[in-house]
RNA sequence: GCCGGGGUGGUGUAGUGGCUAACACGGGGGCCUGUGGAGCCCCAGACCCGGGUUCGAUUCCCGGCCCCGGCCCCA
């Protein structure tokens, strides 16, 4: 291979016809579903002012985006589409007297991250924004649309999780936790709960007698090691009298000596010990987070000054209990009412959340789990949130995420307008379809392939092609000047259903030899007849 | 940013401390009157890059780049 100086940038892909066909197929299905609900397609620029995304997500996301500077200022390639759509509304480009607004988009987005399975630096998102209704039926509709897309695609292996951020926010508000602090709690909570999830998974594997992979084991070690480092440093600080955390509590997070023997334990198949080690680690991981929040406080910014907010222990306990609020509705909701019992606002939010679930059942969507631990760093969600995972995808398994964001348009300087919506990852949907073994139908590139047997018949062959095309058929003309047997072989490989063979004798009599490639049957017919026969066959195939 | 596993013609694979680096498909050419959707013959085409070890590296070692997984992150 000659050395190629110009390469495709990392994290991007090319789309040869076969790949493009898959994307088109999924995109078409998505559009069908969206339009069935009355959503109208919109689009926004591929690049936007940096501030549009920094406003909500903060300066930190700079490193996660493609940023560039032009005369007009700092620009970024859009990392998502909700903010641009809200910007568009805020700018007054949309007639708000016609409500609700039902918009959908399909477009490329860009994030500067390490590529991984199902994660690219350039990726496709499709999504809807339903604006103008604050009611539960709007939230339910949005979820129903997302589920419909998966159904339309025939994707069965997925998991829908629905939660509500207003429950958490209401609880925190009632307990006097400032908004800025709330935003800083969500992140660590999410990290903690995903850590716990991982540990639970290892425990489950061991209990089921399954093997842990090398990665599992090193991941487990790493997570515990982090905790150990923190605990040791904290202990040192405590000796110097610099730690705000009481010594006896610190003793409780000291990591088990067995951490250093994980490999040996595993080699020796001392499963029970491993399990008890993991259980112990889970408890300590949680306790460490609690201690940080209670004694060091949650760091936050107020008026440009870094501050720390010391969390009340009972609030922290509730946050921890929240991580367990995952499961079937009948099971989780009552538990949630207990956990949040002291908070009027949280209870009210739970009522509203149940209204959404009720409405959802009217759409026939019953197969989901309630997950009140969904918190994510999504600072702009204000109510219901949901996620859809495809376990087949591995690490990057989320194919859909969405929720209610009633304040976003207003924050961009527009009118106050309630909104709810979601975004789908098209690349991941394609991947999920492939992995689930669903065949994506690839239409043949043409309906008929004309083979002129000599140069003399070219004028007639081209005339035939034009005739057939004028009737709406997709017709290719051979440009290869090959032997007939090779041409037929070629037609076969191209998957084109009909060959039209034209030699001097056909040209002279103004007919064609129409060959049905599949049946291997051939008839001499007029051009009109050929058109009719092909049309009939093609329609029957449903393209 | 971190941790694994990989990079051999256009594609998919084989193989090796030294021999002409193998095979299939694809490409080019040739033979066979217009259905032999085939076959036969010939040709072109590759060891990711840079160091090191060695008489000699595609092979072993190190670094880089890229790909594939995973961690972190995920608005």
Image (spheres, coloured by chain):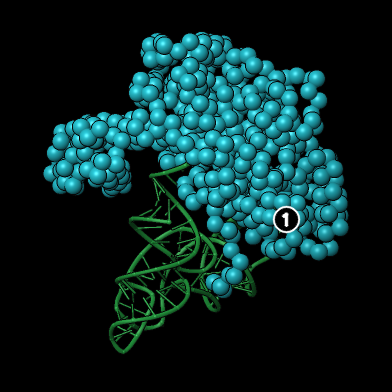
Q: Relative to A324, is A127 above or below?
A: below
Report if residue A352 is visible in the image: yes
Badge 1, how many Cα within 10 Å: few under 14, some, many 20+? few
Q: Residue at x 50, y 34 (%)?
A: A377
> Is residue A482 rendered to the left or right of residue A58?
right
Q: Circle 1 sits in a helix, a strand or a loop, which is it? A: strand
Q: Quadrant of residue A395?
A: top left
Residue A222: x %, y % from top left: 30, 46
Return the residue at label 1.
A70
Q: Position of residue A447 (x, y in %)?
A: 71, 44
Residue A225 in view: no
Residue B34 falls left or right of residue A462: left
The residue lying toward the viewer, choosing from A25 and B28, is A25
Q: Which residue lies at the image location 64% right of the left edge and 16% below the top edge?
A: A134
Pick whichever, A267 or A209, lies toward us.
A267
Quadrant of res A191: top left
Chain that appears green = B
Tell me if A426 is positioned left or right of A34 in this view: left
Measuring from the top left, give residue A184's x and y in whole percent.
47, 34
Q: What residue is rendered at 59% in x and 19% in y?
A: A139
Q: Colour of chain A?
A: cyan
Q: Quadrant of the N terminus of chain A?
A: bottom right
């Amino acid at each position: 291979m000659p050395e190629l100086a110009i390469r495709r940038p990392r994290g991007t892909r090319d789309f040869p016809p076969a790949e493009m066909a898959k994307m088109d197929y999924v995109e078409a299905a998505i559009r069908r579903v969206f339009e069935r609900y009355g959503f109208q397609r919109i689009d926004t620029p591929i690049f936007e002012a940096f501030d549009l995304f920094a406003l909500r997500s903060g300066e930190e996301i700079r490193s996660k985006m493609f940023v560039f500077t032009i005369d007009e200022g700092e620009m970024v390639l859009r990392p998502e589409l909700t903010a641009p759509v809200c910007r568009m509304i805020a700018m007054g480009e949309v007639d708000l007297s016609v409500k609700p607004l039902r918009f959908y988009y399909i477009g490329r987005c860009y994030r500067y991250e390490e590529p991984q399975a199902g994660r690219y630096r350039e990726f496709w998102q499709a999504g809807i924004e339903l604006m103008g209704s604050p009611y539960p039926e709007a939230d339910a509709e949005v979820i129903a649309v997302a589920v419909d897309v998966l159904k339309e695609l025939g994707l069965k292996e997925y998991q829908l999780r629905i939660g509500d951020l207003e429950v958490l926010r209401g609880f925190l508000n009632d307990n006097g936790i400032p908004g800025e602090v709330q935003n800083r709690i969500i992140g660590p909570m999410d990290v903690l709960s995903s850590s716990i999830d991982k540990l639970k998974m290892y425990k489950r594997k061991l209990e089921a007698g399954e093997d842990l992979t090398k990665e599992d084991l090193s991941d487990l070690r790493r997570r515990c090691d982090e905790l150990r480092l923190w605990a040791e440093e904290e202990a040192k600080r405590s000796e110097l009298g610099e730690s705000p955390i009481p010594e006896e509590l610190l003793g409780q997070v000291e990591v088990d000596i067995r951490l250093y023997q994980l490999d040996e334990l595993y080699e020796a198949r001392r499963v029970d010990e491993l399990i008890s080690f993991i259980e112990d680690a889970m408890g300590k991981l949680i306790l460490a987070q609690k201690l940080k929040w209670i004694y060091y406080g949650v760091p936050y910014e107020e008026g440009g000054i870094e501050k720390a907010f010391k969390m009340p222990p009972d609030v922290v306990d509730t946050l921890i209990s929240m991580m367990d609020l995952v499961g079937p509705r009948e099971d989780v909701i009552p538990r949630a009412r207990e956990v949040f019992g002291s908070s009027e606002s949280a209870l009210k939010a739970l009522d509203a959340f149940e209204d959404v679930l009720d409405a959802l059942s009217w759409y026939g969507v019953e197969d989901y789990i309630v997950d009140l631990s969904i918190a994510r760093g999504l600072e702009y969600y204000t109510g219901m949130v949901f996620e859809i995972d495809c376990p087949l995808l591995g690490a990057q398994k989320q194919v859909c995420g969405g929720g209610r964001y009633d304040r976003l348009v207003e924050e961009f300087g527009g009118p106050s307008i309630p909104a709810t919506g979601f975004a789908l990852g098209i690349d991941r949907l394609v991947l999920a379809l492939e992995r689930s073994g669903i065949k994506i139908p690839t239409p043949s590139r043409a309906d008929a392939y004309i083979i002129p047997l000599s140069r003399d018949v070219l004028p007639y062959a081209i005339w035939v092609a034009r005739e057939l095309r004028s009737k709406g058929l997709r017709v290719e003309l051979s440009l290869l000047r090959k032997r007939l047997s090779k041409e037929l072989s070629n037609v076969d490989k191209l998957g084109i259903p009909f060959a039209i063979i034209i030699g001097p004798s056909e040209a002279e009599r103004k007919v064609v030899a129409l060959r049905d490639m599949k049946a291997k049957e051939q008839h001499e017919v007029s051009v009109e007849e050929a058109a009719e026969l092909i049309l009939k066959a093609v329609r029957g195939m449903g393209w």
